[in-house]
Image: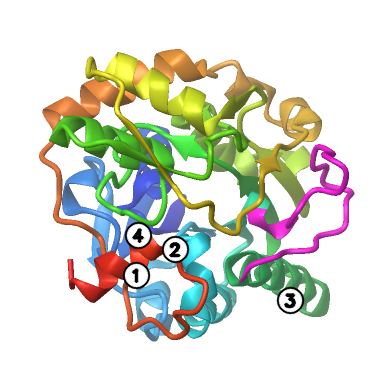
Amino acid sequence: MNIIVTGGAGFIGSHVAEILVGRGHRVLGLDDLSGGFPENIPDGVDFERRSVNDPLDELFAAYRPEVVYHLAAYAAEGLSHHIPVFNYQNNLLATANVLSAGYRAGIRHFVFTSSIAAYGHPQNGEVFDEEMACHPCDPYGVAKVACEQHIRGFAHYYGVPHYTIFRPHNVFGPRQNIADPYRNVVGIFMKAALAGEAMLIFGDGSQTRSFSYITSVASAIADAPFLAGAVDKTFNIGGDKPWTVRELARHVCDVMAVPERLEFLPPRNEVAHAHCNHRLAREVFAGAFELDVDVATGLTLMADFVRRTKIPPSTECPCPVEISNGMPPSWLRRLSQGI
């Protein structure tokens, strides 16, 4: 089967592409390399350096994909408050562009990675369930909800393609960009450890997230077009065990074998506690969850990869800041210094 994976040189995209090519599919990865890296592209995967905002019809017509996995996005949730126009262009408009090109090329299934950010702030500490209404509280979450609605509406209007939507959260592992100062807290902490710097924590570090190693998440995403139970469905995907950010930092210090050095910054406006119910995903993607790696083991595996890998240059804000009000002072200083 011919398959296109956008974000194919990125973190999740490269793992999904690797699984697919290992199963004998012909896979083309698209990536503009703004946050992905050529060395992430798995052996056997064709590659085209291309933005998902570019015209895609000629490329799609030549490759004739049956399935498209749209995993490319600009995913710095906190920064999206300050670059909303860029955020919508590179999430909502890009998704519409990829889906339309796929439709014109005759694809039968479209897989999309949304985000836990679609839910917004939990009410009374509840765990997010797919049946809950989405009330996103930042432009990134708004864009993801709009993408989901566009995909569903498109399929309803045209009758094709089928789709599967995933809402992953706090996924980590090898090939993750550890040089992005605005997202991927595990990578941020590991880069600080390598540099002998303090790990920066917004607030007191009591905010909680459920982290998940890449293996089961990538496997579930890869499986989606081939499972009847995944057709035209939306799934939360990720880990179940809550970790405070402070606990995570301490554990990263342990696996990186560095003294604990934590620096606490003024809190930023973010969701304090965000967790999902994964009952539906565990039912449909039982085989993928059998590959689950616990967080402690996953952090050790990622630390081993990070030590062996050259740290890339910092992935800075991709465009001029559109609104600076409310930006964390540490980000403002970084941007004003042109780092």
Look at mark 4 in the image and give the residue it sits on: 330
Look at mark 1 in the image and give the residue it sits on: 332
What's the CA distance linking mark 4 and mark 1? 5 Å
Asked whether the residues under the numbered discs 4 and 2 touch, taking CB atoms below 8 Å apart as contact, a structural biologist would say: yes
Which amino acid type is shown beneath numbered disc 4? Answer: Ser
Residue 142 vs 1, above or below: the answer is below
Quadrant showing the C terminus: bottom left
Which amino acid type is shown beneath numbered disc 2? Answer: Pro
Element at badge 2? loop
Tag 1: Cα neighbours inside 10 Å, few (<14), some, or many (≥20)?
some
Instruction: Tell me where residue 298 sits by quadrant.
Output: top left
Q: Which circle's residue, 3 or 4, is located before the other in the chain?
A: 3
Look at mark 3 in the image and give the residue it sits on: 154
Element at badge 4? helix
Q: Which circle's residue, 3 or 2, is located before the other in the chain?
A: 3
Q: Which mark is residue 328?
A: 2
Q: Which mark is residue 27?
A: none
Magenta highlight on residue 69: no
Instruction: Tell me where residue 113 sits by quadrant.
Output: bottom right
What's the CA distance linking mark 3 and mark 4? 41 Å
What's the CA distance linking mark 3 and mark 1? 39 Å
Residue at the spot x=38%, y=81% of the render? Answer: 321
Dominant secondary-structure state across the stretch colored magenta: loop
Q: Nearer the viewer, mark 3 or mark 1?
A: 1
Residue at the spot x=28%, y=67% of the render? Answer: 333
Q: Nearer the viewer, residue 100 or 247?
A: 247
Residue 233 vs 306, above or below: the answer is below
